[in-house]
Each structure stands twice: as structure tokens, then as C-alpha cells.
């Protein structure tokens, strides 16, 4: 027996095994539906049981109240005896109803456990079917590897191989642009954090201005905090520029390649430490305000680039999905041709 005949016989053997799993998808759907139904029934009965328990509890309270009143007011004993009997009967009926609900709930829970077990069995059968089908496709590929089929089979084999390359390339490009999107998202977050630091620096500068003449220590502390927040903002914006640059390296078509760039004056920290005074604080305030304005504009540009990249990634993902569909169709057509050929008699 040559290699083709051997693979062909194994293929037929797998086909016979797959016939035993023809209805597994239907069984799985039925098991899932049964589990949903029983779970809904359990939830409904649990709710009814809770309501019955509350009703019984309320009835027992009213029964105790009626009994206590009957004992305390012996003059109107007959009247209260009738009331006691009324609530006693209601309580007994509630107990019977609650007992029935508990029994029904236990039954439904057992049914739910059975449905879960049936679902697990169906899932295992589907997994076994999928494994057999995978082996069948591998054998089919091996049987025709290096073996020329007819013209139709050769056409679909070439089409499948071409579409596979197209799909792999589209997925690779989509993954690369998704990395660029992640860099832009990181730049966006860093820009927002840097902008927040500048806002805090402005707040400390305000404290510095109004603390003049009220204490050198408070003014010194506010100046130091202003400097610290400006340095943090500068560092965050530099990180944002680096992240944005990484994104541009992946996708040079991102609009406004310098979107995250902001100019920070070295004058800010130097003067606020060594030449601290009212005039210096006012100058620093102006420069912080200018940095805040530039940061806000840079944020808008980075957000625009981010939205552009989101749209671009969505287009690439849609192309990749379409290429996947085309590849699936070609693989199905190729499989049909090979199944047709492998079932042809060998003379």
C-alpha cells in the first residue's frame, strides 16, 4: 500500500468516526437550552420561596399577637379565639405551601445539576468531534501534498495559499498599528497627567503670591512645590513626546508629528529658587499659564492623532476580517474538491 492509499484509508476511518458525532452541535444547543430553563425555574422558585417564608413569618407574628391579646383580654375571649383560629389556619396553609416550594426547589436544583452534567458531556463530545475534524483536515492536506490533483483542485490550492499570505500580512499590519495605538494612548495619558501637574503648579504659585508678608516659610514651601510640579510636568510631557515618537515611527501618516511637543522655560525653576520675590512669582505665573495653554493645545492634537489611529486600526481590522472570510471560503472550496477526489475510485 503506497502513502496515498494509507492516508486515504485513515481518512475514511476518521470520516466514519465523525458520522457518530453528527448531532453533537444539536445536543449541545439542547443542553444549553435545558440548563437555561432549569436555572430560570430555580431562580423563580427561590424568589417564590423567599416570598412564602416572609408571608409565613408575618402570619406567625400575627398569630402570636392574636394569642397574646386573647390571653390578656379574657373578657372578649370568644372574639379573640376566632381571630386566633383564623391566623392559625393561615399559618398552617403557609407552612404547607412553603414545604411544597422547598420540595419543588430541591427537585429543580437536582434537574439543574443534571442539566449541567449533560452540558459538560455535550461539550466534551463537541471537543472530540472538533479534534477528529482537525485530524481529518490534516490527513486530507497530507494526502494531496506533492500529489497533483485535477485543475480545479490545483486552482483552489493556489488560491488558498495566496489568500493565506494576504491574510497573514493584513494581520501583521493590523498588529503593528495596534501597537502604535497603544503608544498614542500612553502619550495621551502622560499628557493629561502633565497638564494636571501644571494646574497644581499654578495653584501653589497662587499660594506663593498671597503668602507674601505672611511668612517666609509658607512662601518658600509654595515656591518649592511649584518647582516640583513643573519638573514633574516637564518629565511627563517628555515621556509623552517619546511615546508619540514611537507611534509615528510605526505609522508615519499620523497627523502632526510634533503634536506632543511643548516648550518649557528653564527660567521657571531657576528664578523661583534663587531669585524668589513678588515680581519673580508673577513672571513664573505667566510662564506656567503659557505652559498650561500649550499643554491643552498639545492634548487636543494628541487626541486628534489618537482618534485618527483608532479609525485606521478599525479599517485594518475590517480588512483582516474580510481576508479571513475569503481564506475560509477558499479553504472550504479546496476541501470540497479534495474530498471529491479522495472519494473517487482508485484503479
Image (cartoon, rainbow, N blue to C red):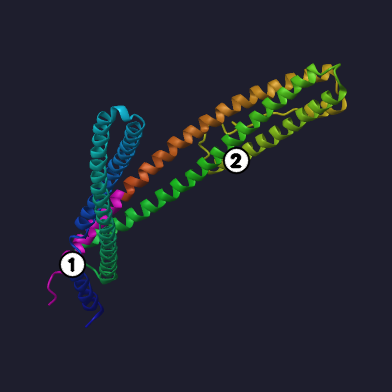
Magenta region includes residue 24:
no
Image quarter (top left, top right, bottom left or bottom right) of the N terminus: bottom left
Lateral position of residue 343 relative to residue 78, left or right: left
Looking at the image, residue 198 sits to the left or right of residue 187; the answer is right
Magenta-colored segment: predominant secondary structure: helix
Q: CA distance from mark 2 to mark 1?
A: 56 Å
In this rendering, is residue 18 above or below 175? below
Q: x, y (%) of residue 287?
A: 73, 22
Quadrant in the rendering for residue 263: top right
Which quadrant, please, contains the C terminus? bottom left
Q: Is residue 267 visible?
A: no
Depth order, front residue of 330/132: 132
Which of the numbered marks, if any, corresponds to residue 135?
none
Where in the figure is residue 77, as x and y percent of width and height? 28, 31
Q: Residue 148, position in %: x, y? A: 24, 68
**Residue 338 part of the magenta-drawn span:** yes
Instruction: Name which residue lies at 81% across and 28% down.
Output: 221
In this rendering, the answer to whether 74 lies above or below 9 is: above
Q: Is residue 24 visible?
A: yes
Q: Is residue 91 above or below residue 266?
A: below
Q: Position of residue 75 (x, y in %)?
A: 31, 27
Q: Nearer the viewer, residue 207 or 270?
A: 207
Residue density around tag 2, few if under 14, some if 14–19, many if 20 or more, within 10 Å: many
Q: Which residue is mark 2?
A: 243
Which is nearer the N-term, disc 2 or disc 1? 1
Left or right of residue 191, residue 46 in this image:
left
Residue for badge 1 = 20
Residue at the spot x=32%, y=32% of the render? 70
Task: Give left or right: position of 44 versus 229.
Answer: left
Magenta-colored span: 325-347
Q: Secondary structure at mark 2?
A: helix
Amino acid at each position: 500500500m503506497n502513502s496515498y492509499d494509507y492516508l486515504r484509508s485513515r481518512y475514511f476511518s476518521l470520516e466514519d468516526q465523525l458520522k457518530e458525532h453528527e448531532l453533537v452541535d444539536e445536543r449541545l444547543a439542547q443542553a444549553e437550552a435545558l440548563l437555561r430553563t432549569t436555572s430560570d425555574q430555580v431562580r423563580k422558585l427561590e424568589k417564590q420561596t423567599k416570598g412564602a417564608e416572609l408571608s409565613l413569618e408575618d402570619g406567625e407574628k400575627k398569630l402570636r399577637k392574636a394569642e397574646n391579646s386573647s390571653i390578656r383580654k379574657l373578657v372578649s375571649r370568644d372574639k379573640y379565639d376566632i381571630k386566633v383560629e383564623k391566623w392559625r389556619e393561615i399559618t398552617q396553609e403557609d407552612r404547607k405551601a412553603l414545604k411544597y416550594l422547598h420540595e419543588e426547589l430541591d427537585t429543580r436544583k437536582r434537574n439543574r445539576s443534571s442539566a449541567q452534567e449533560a452540558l459538560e458531556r455535550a461539550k466534551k463530545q463537541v471537543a472530540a468531534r472538533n479534534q477528529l475534524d482537525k485530524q481529518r483536515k490534516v490527513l486530507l492536506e497530507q494526502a494531496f501534498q506533492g500529489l497533483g490533483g485535477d485543475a480545479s483542485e490545483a486552482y483552489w490550492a493556489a488560491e488558498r495559499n495566496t489568500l493565506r499570505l494576504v491574510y497573514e500580512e493584513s494581520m501583521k499590519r493590523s498588529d503593528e498599528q495596534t501597537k502604535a495605538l497603544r503608544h498614542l494612548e500612553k502619550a495621551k495619558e502622560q499628557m493629561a497627567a502633565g497638564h494636571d501637574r501644571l494646574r497644581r503648579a499654578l495653584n501653589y504659585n497662587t499660594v506663593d503670591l498671597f503668602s507674601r508678608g505672611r511668612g517666609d516659610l509658607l512662601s518658600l514651601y509654595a515656591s518649592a512645590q511649584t518647582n516640583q510640579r513643573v519638573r514633574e510636568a516637564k518629565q511627563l510631557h517628555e515621556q509623552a513626546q517619546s511615546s508619540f515618537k514611537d507611534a509615528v515611527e510605526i505609522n508615519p501618516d499620523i497627523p502632526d508629528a510634533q503634536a506632543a511637543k511643548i516648550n518649557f522655560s528653564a527660567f521657571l525653576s531657576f528664578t523661583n529658587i534663587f531669585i524668589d520675590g513678588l515680581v519673580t512669582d508673577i513672571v513664573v505665573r505667566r510662564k506656567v499659564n503659557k505652559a498650561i495653554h500649550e499643554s491643552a493645545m498639545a492634548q487636543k492634537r494628541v487626541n486628534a492623532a489618537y482618534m485618527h489611529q483608532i479609525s485606521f486600526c478599525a479599517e485594518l481590522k475590517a480588512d483582516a476580517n474580510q481576508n479571513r472570510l475569503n481564506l475560509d471560503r477558499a479553504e472550504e472550496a479546496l476541501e470540497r474538491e479534495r474530498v471529491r477526489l479522495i472519494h473517487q475510485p482508485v484503479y
